[in-house]
Image: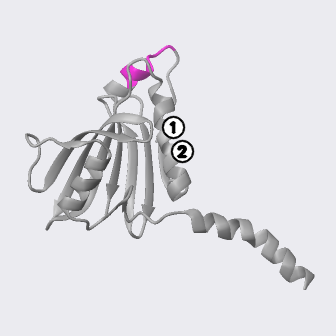
Amino acid sequence: MKRTILFLLLALPFYSYSQTLKPIDGFFDIKFGSDAETVQKWVSEKGGKMNEERSTFQAVQFVNLTLGRTRGIDLEVRFQNNMATRATFFYPVDARADIVQAYKRITVDLTKTYGKGVSEITTPPHPGTNIRQDIKSGKRLYFTLWDDPNGHIMSAIDTSLKIIVIYKK
């Protein structure tokens, strides 16, 4: 009896942790397979608007979403047979802000939701170099990948100094 109770007490933290991890079956409140109307309604609720000039039937562009305290997020949602299969979020970073810290905050939030990424690449800084210049030139990389049977998430800092998060079925 004592062993059973001890086992349950030791196993409970692992059980509860694994129960809090979410499968990668969509992006935010939108499930993969949702139609364009559902996505547009969600974007409107987040203050975003469709960029009709840059949108196509298969790739719809949205601008100026607000997610939490972050404003000015752009989004591209790809559709196949009117079903969302991929979403790419472009997070702006103020020129005065620490882009690496902003990236880490987003990565920490994703880790809290989906668990530790399966792959993470961060190249070390070179002494005396400018981080932003190194990222722009491709000398410095920040990349994290989450993977499960339902989908994938990739976060990175791109060479235009935006933080990109891609959700893909």
Give residue 137's position: percent from left, percent from top: 32, 25
Instruction: Say above or below: 169 vs 120.
Output: below
Residue that carries the numbered disc 2 in the rendered image: 108
Residue that carries the numbered disc 1 in the rendered image: 104
Give residue 62's position: percent from left, percent from top: 21, 43
Q: Looking at this view, is 93 or 65 the one in front?
A: 65
Give residue 3's position: percent from left, percent from top: 88, 81
Residue at 20% from the left image edge and 64% from the top image edge: 35
Q: Amino acid at mark 1?
A: Lys
- Left or right, residue 165 beside residue 74: right
Question: Circles 1 and 2: CB distance less than 8 Å?
Answer: yes
- Left or right, residue 120 beside residue 70: right
Give residue 159's position: percent from left, percent from top: 31, 30
Which quadrant: the N terminus? bottom right
Q: Residues within 10 Å of mark 1 (few under 14, many from 20)?
A: some
- Left or right, residue 32 beside residue 120: left
Q: Amino acid at mark 2?
A: Val
Q: Looking at this view, is 135 or 107 the one in front?
A: 107
Q: Residue furthest top?
A: 128
- Is residue 112 inside the magenta stretch? no
Question: Residue 133: which numbered mark, if any?
Answer: none
Q: Looking at this view, is 61 or 114 the one in front?
A: 61
Q: Which residues are magenta?
A: 128-134
| Label 1 to label 2: alpha-carbon separation | 6 Å
- Is residue 133 inside the magenta stretch? yes
Q: Secondary structure at mark 2?
A: helix
